[in-house]
Image (cartoon, rainbow, N blue to C red):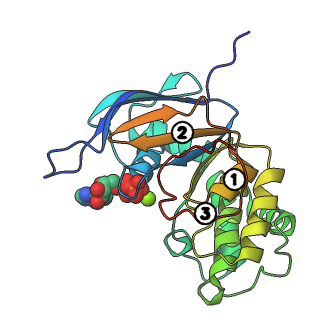
């Protein structure tokens, strides 16, 4: 039996109102169980692409399939969003409950779990992320790194099949970045990670795609590698010969 791709985008185009140039132009993408790094200059449309993938923006044209089913309307995307977790670039956009436990239990409650089951799921997820004891903490008083991990917990508590992570290491200190790296490496889910952080991508993903001028390309010949030097122009794809 041939397994269907998790998500498939076919000839997707998108342009913001009042702009003449499309951000995405006839874009094709197929994701199964890989861990993909997505790079591209600022403003190239990476976040827009994620928003389209979860139905937060309707494409101007093109088709999107989840597990072989075409997603046509908001009802379809509501079901998709149970299985595709989107970690926003800013944790403050993701967290809205007074306490950490309420935020992390929100998704499971929405999935139809009982309050006790949702609580257990949230407590278990926090523990897996090394956040045991954070349950009653006031969300808006957490540090930036703590907020990022709690935001990740709000998604993982729904046990999604695919994770979309938008610049997850932005503004993290090195220790929290390493902690996030370890967590992502240990997760079973397929992942697409938008990042300018090459070393982080080298440790978390196996394929690299670039998005530029509305098109996405898979870097067939680039090997993601870890290295230590400063990229003055680190948001552009590049190769090393040594
Ligand atoms: N709500 C919006 N209205 C108009 N233009 C937008 C809006 N959001 C983003 N853009 C523009 O669309 C382009 C792509 O944005 P975005 O997807 O956020 O890029 P990236 O995530 O790659 O930095 C940018 O030029 C940005 O200014
Ligand atoms: Mg972005």
Where does residue 104 sit, x and y in percent of width and height? 69, 67
Q: Is residue 63 above or below residue 168?
A: above
**Quarter occupied by the N terminus:** top right
State which tag comes first along the sequence, 3 or 1.
1
The image quadrant where one finds the C terminus is top right
CB atoms of marks 1 and 2 within 8 Å:
no
Viewer-nearest residue: 230 or 21: 230
* Earlier sequence position, callout 1 versus callout 2: 1
Does label 2 point to a residue whose CB lies under 8 Å from ligand 1?
Answer: no
Residue 139 in which image quadrant: bottom right
On the image, which quarter does residue 63 sit in?
Answer: top left
136 and 86: which is toward the camera: 86
| x then y, percent, for residue 154 | 66, 63
Mark 2 falls on what kind of element?
strand
Above/below status of 95 relative to 115: below
Counting from the top left corner in percent of width and height, residue 98 is at 61, 83
Quick one: label 2, few (<14), some, or many (20+) residues within 10 Å? many
Q: Which label belongs to residue 209?
A: 2
SS class, disc 1: loop
130 with respect to 100 (left or right): right
Q: Is residue 114 visible?
A: yes
Can you tell which mark lies on residue 168?
Answer: 3
């Amino acid at each position: 039996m041939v397994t269907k791709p998790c998500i498939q985008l076919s000839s997707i185009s998108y342009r913001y109102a009042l702009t003449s140039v499309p951000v995405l132009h006839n874009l094709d993408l197929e994701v199964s169980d890989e861990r993909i790094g997505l790079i591209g200059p600022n403003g190239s449309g990476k976040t827009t692409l994620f928003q389209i993938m979860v139905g937060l923006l309707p494409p101007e044209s093109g088709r999107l399939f989840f597990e072989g089913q075409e997603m046509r309307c908001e009802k379809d995307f509501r079901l998709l969003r149970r299985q595709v977790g989107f970690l926003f670039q800013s944790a403050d956009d993701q967290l809205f409950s007074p306490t950490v436990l309420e935020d992390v239990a929100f998704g499971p409650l929405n999935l139809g779990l009982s309050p006790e089951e949702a609580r257990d799921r949230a407590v278990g997820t926090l523990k897996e992320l090394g956040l045991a004891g954070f349950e009653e903490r006031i969300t808006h008083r957490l540090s930036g790194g703590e907020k990022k991990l709690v935001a990740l917990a709000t998604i993982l508590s729904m046990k999604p099949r695919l994770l979309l992570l938008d610049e997850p290491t932005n503004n993290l200190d090195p220790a929290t970045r390493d902690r996030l790296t370890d967590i992502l490496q240990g997760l079973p889910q397929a992942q697409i990670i938008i990042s300018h952080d090459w070393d982080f991508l080298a440790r978390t993903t196996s394929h690299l795609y670039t998005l530029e001028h509305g098109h996405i390309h898979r870097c067939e010949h680039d090997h993601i590698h870890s290295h230590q030097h400063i990229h003055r122009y680190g948001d552009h794809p590049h190769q090393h010969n040594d």
